[in-house]
Amino acid sequence: MNREEALEVFRNSEEIVTPQEVNASVDRMAGAIKSAIGDTFPMVLSVMGGAAVFTGMLLPRLDFPLEFDYIHLSRYNNTTTGGAMQWRVAPRDSVRGRVVLVLDDILDEGATMAAIRDRILEMGASHFYSAVLCEKLLNKAKPSHPDFCGFTVPDRYVFGCGMDARGYWRNLPSIRALHSAK
């Protein structure tokens, strides 16, 4: 990993969602989340590391009492294809009996969110909701769909707003798509 590789990733991409569109969508999602669960004192869990930027944008817009924590389940490990799921930080017992909202950067095939949902419900959460900045449009069935979604994106590798391409560019305020996964 180095600067030139990061710049090559950027040059091999195009912007598909502007920073202004990202902010407007996060505002819209915050309103929808408040309407759905704002009176429940939910436990909000952020999926590290991709959801860090999205979480930082969304949490200040949720103007109701909540508890916050994080979990870490990964499939990508700085690659552009998903592999085996690895729990790095599992949910805590504080989800028991609670409305839980899980925040993640993208719902791709849905397997990661389905595993998170199943684990949290098995631990006794009273209700599970998910919010993602992006959901990828795929031509196959998914085991999970988000309750709140900022954008649908094409079946391309996307990055920015917390999502990375080979470990790079999580810090971008826009969402970009690779021209190819080379």
Image (cartoon, rainbow, N blue to C red):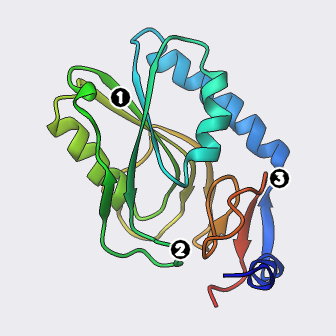
The CA span between labels 1 and 3 is: 30 Å
Residue at left 55%, top 11%?
Answer: 64
Mark 2 vs mark 1: in front: 2
Element under disc 1 = strand
Residue at left 73%, top 56%?
Answer: 171
The CA span between labels 2 and 1 is: 28 Å
Element under disc 2 = loop
Q: Residue furthest front?
A: 2
Q: Is residue 80 above or below residue 120?
A: below
Whole-percent x, y for residue 157 in the image: 61, 73
The residue that disc 2 covers is: 78
Amino acid carrying label 1: it is Val
Q: Is residue 86 above or below residue 52?
A: below
Quadrant of residue 82 within the rendered picture: bottom left
Whole-percent x, y for residue 14 in the image: 80, 72
Determine crowd level at label 2: few under 14, some 14-19, many 20+ residues with C-alpha closer than 10 A.
few
The residue that disc 3 covers is: 18
The label number, if any, that marks residue 155 in the structure image: none
Determine crowd level at label 3: few under 14, some 14-19, many 20+ residues with C-alpha closer than 10 A.
few
Amino acid carrying label 3: it is Thr
Amino acid carrying label 2: it is Asn
The residue that disc 1 covers is: 100
Is 153 displayed left or right of 35 in the figure? right
Determine crowd level at label 1: few under 14, some 14-19, many 20+ residues with C-alpha closer than 10 A.
many
Element under disc 3 = loop
Residue at left 74%, top 65%?
Answer: 176
